[in-house]
Amino acid sequence: VIGGLLLDYMNHFLLLGVSMLATTAGFYLIPFCKKAVFLIVMMSVFGASVSVVDTGGNVLILDLWGDKGAPHMQALHFSFALGASLAPLLAKLVWGTTTSTQNHTETDFVPLVLNRSSGATSDSLFAVPEDMTLLWTYASVGTYVLVVSVFLFGLFCKKSSRQKKSTASGQEARRAKYHWALLFLLFLFFFFYVGAEVTYGSYIFSFATTHVGMEESEAAGLNSVFWGTFAACRGLAIFFATLLQPGTMIVLSNIGSLVSSFFLVLFHKTPLCLWIATSVYGASMAVTFPSGVSWIEQYTTLTGKSTAFFVFGAALGEMAIPAVIGILEGHYPDLPIVLYICFASAIFTAVLFPVMYKLATLPLDHH
């Protein structure tokens, strides 16, 4: 929310550069933290800076390309999926670190969480970690982020003429008749969509081992299939976005999510169906978020504050729905709560989008 407010008053490149610089500081300092309270502070700084980057990236693309930026929006969100898939693998290959590709989300880039015990008894806030691979893993990703921030500062210094043009054209902004009602419905849409995406990616491993009886290696493969099809379809969506309207892509994604989650609920005990439905579910979930942002821009111009509003809804769903499922799983361990919630979310988003479309296509205000 704060990032969205700042985007309306600050140069976008400058704010993104500062946020990436703060992210770099988090990457460099997290491995040195020896106290839980200081680690909490550093992770909070990291989360705040990454959230500004998430909101700012969407706003910047809309500012530069407007309602013609669907392929660029798909490319941005493909980069999220690609980074979430590659970073843990690169860390494992290069530094020999054991990591997991679970829990990658729509609205953030999760740092590598490495579980290790520490025998340190020092009261200092900072200390060099005993496992140097931990330090080099964070430092290598942090250095990459630092290079990106340098490029963003360079764009700020250049004062791109493209941004001046977009600012000038922004005075002729469109505004839907029910602008804030539409944004509120989009808030709810992304709340359930991102919540379901994160929930399935987070819980499918434990669900497959405890409810279906899969081996851990099989369950890990199932998790990789979900995120693999998710990333692959986001890459393909860059090209599909040049041929299909964002609304069409959302409808196709909703149908795919509804059908696959329905089969997951019916045949969750059948491993073959679980593999097929998981791959279809991952592919169906891939393009919804970037297509939703591109779709709304066709009917009402988004500012930093309005973009932050529905991105906040996505972040809230990503936080709340997995937590609620965790509580329900404790009370009803024999039921596939994860699949029920994902199916219910698919129903909700499938019903909500036609309502949003009806509101969006009502006549525009003259001003």
Image (spheres, helix red, strand yellow):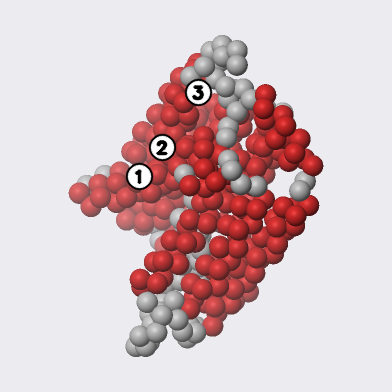
Residue on which the image places disc 2: 192
Determine whether the residue tagged by mark 3 lies in a helix, strand or loop.
Answer: helix
Q: Earlier in the sequence, mark 1 or mark 3?
A: 3
Q: Quadrant of residue 173?
A: top right
Of discs 3 and 2, which sits in the foreground? 3
**Are the residues at dot 3 and dot 2 in contact (C-beta closer than 8 Å)?**
no
Amino acid of disc 3: His
**Alpha carbons under labels 1 and 2: distance apart:** 8 Å
**Are the residues at dot 1 and dot 3 in contact (C-beta closer than 8 Å)?**
no
Give the quadrant of the C terminus. top right
Q: Is residue 73 left or right of residue 310?
A: right
- The residue shown at (67%, 30%) is 170
Amino acid of disc 1: Ile
Determine whether the residue tagged by mark 2 lies in a helix, strand or loop.
Answer: helix
Amino acid of disc 2: Phe
When the figure is inspected, residue 255 is found, relative to residue 197, above or below; the finding is above
- Residue 171, position in %: x, y? 67, 27
**Alpha carbons under labels 3 and 2: distance apart:** 20 Å
From this viewpoint, which residue is outermost toward the left?
331
Q: Residues within 10 Å of mark 2 (few under 14, many from 20)?
A: many
- Residue 89, position in %: x, y? 58, 65
When the figure is inspected, residue 348 is found, relative to residue 313, above or below; the finding is above
Residue on which the image places disc 1: 321
- The residue shown at (55%, 73%) is 28
Q: Earlier in the sequence, mark 1 or mark 2?
A: 2
Determine whether the residue tagged by mark 1 lies in a helix, strand or loop.
Answer: helix
In the image shown, does 262 or 26 lie closer to the viewer?
Answer: 26
Residue on which the image places disc 3: 179
- Residue 101, position in %: x, y? 51, 60
**Are the residues at dot 1 and dot 2 in contact (C-beta closer than 8 Å)?**
yes
- The residue shown at (66%, 60%) is 149
Q: Earlier in the sequence, mark 3 or mark 2?
A: 3
